[in-house]
Amino acid sequence: MLLPQKHTGADTTIFSVMSALAAAHGAINLSQGFPDYPIDNRIQQLLKEATEQGFNQYAPMPGLPVLTEQIAQQKNRQLNLRIDPTHITICPGASYGIFVTLATVLSKGDEVIILEPAYDAYIPAIEINGGIPVAVPLNYPDFSVDWDRLKAAISPKTKAIIVNTPHNPTGMVWSAADWQQLATLLSGREIMVISDEVYDQIVFDGAKHHSVLQQEALKDQCVAVFSFGKQFHATGWKIGYTIASAAITKAIRKVHQFIAFSVNTPAQYALGMFMQQFPDEDNCALLNGKRDLLNQLLADTPFKILQPAAGSYFQVADYSQWQDMPDTEFAQWLTKEAGVATIPLSAFYKDGTDNKLVRFCFAKEEATLRAAIQKIKAKL
């Protein structure tokens, strides 16, 4: 049977490829963005409590009230907003939240602007839903937005722009001024802003996360997407959520109800109850220390840090002073020969732009980070 080619993305994502390569060669996996330390035991106990108390059947399609209410309270407290819990839709992961938003918004031939390097799920999600991705490169090496190039990329067919802050893979964080610049650029234009904010709880050096939800001028043309996997280091739970206006939320749910309908009920209960009982849990200090440790260790290697990550799980490093090979080849060599897996940044560009950079995940145990750098130093 001849099956249609639904997107131009890789047959297997670079994350799966590098994780499989790491497993095959017994390498330390600093490629895929998942922690190797346990989640909070209190959440585990609440998950057990949920199953024992009978939270084992379908959750309401928008999400369990105990969770949506706690999300609203957290966001209102952190962002100084007045989000209504009914504007929150629980999803099976943030990637799904982005996909279902695109499925809601796009018609065949609509254009969606992405800022590269960009998470590799964006382009396939756009194409599967009939859209055309339009890539605008961020400035190198600081990965700031080139506002002139972004403005030039807007056409009559532009339906949406995807923003990611804190940014994967670079760790760059948008400022309030960045958001104001985007709001000014989009003024009077019917262009949706899909804001991927899965690392919103992980910003460093005392900085603050700025959300699209805080932009009054964009409130009726935006969807913010979040993830509990990153917030509570439970990536395997695959639970995220969208926040949007009442009208956009209603439209998203008209699609969502016929794809996933609802999300893991016991896990929703556990997360909601944990947020209720421990509302001020903070991951920033933990990950800030891990970033600092990784960068300190890398300072004794040929890797060059362009700038410390301002947020996220990831640190980008330049290897050009060590090897001259293309980044994908280098990442494979590092995995096989040094026993440390990373992600080549060319995988985050539509055209494969190669600036001799790799991405390290530092959401790991201290012993894991130290062992990885020791392996690298052994190859020098």
Image (cartoon, rainbow, N blue to C red):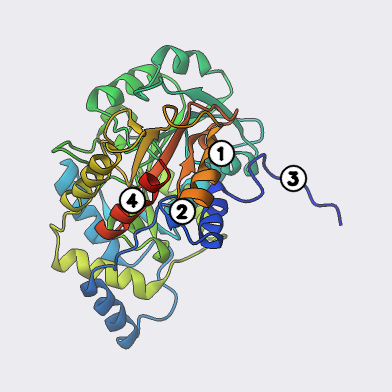
Please report the residue visible at 27 percent of the width from the left and 83 percent of the height from the top.
49
Q: Measure the C-alpha gap from mark 2 to mark 3.
A: 35 Å
- In this view, the residue in front, 290 or 159, is 290
Q: Quadrant of the N terminus?
A: bottom right
- Please name the residue that numbered disc 1 is placed on: 328
Q: Amino acid at mark 1?
A: Thr
Q: Secondary structure at mark 4?
A: helix
Q: What residue did someone put label 4 on?
A: 374
Q: Amino acid at mark 3?
A: Gln
- As drawn, the label of residue 339 is 2
Q: Where does the image place residue 230, in percent across and percent down from the top left?
A: 33, 54
Tell me if label 2 and label 3 are in contact, CB under 8 Å. Answer: no
Report which residue position mark 3 lands on: 5
Q: Earlier in the sequence, mark 2 or mark 1?
A: 1
Q: Three-letter amino acid code at disc 2?
A: Gly
Q: Is residue 264 visible?
A: yes
Vertical placement of residue 43 versus 326, above or below: below
Q: Is residue 100 visible?
A: no
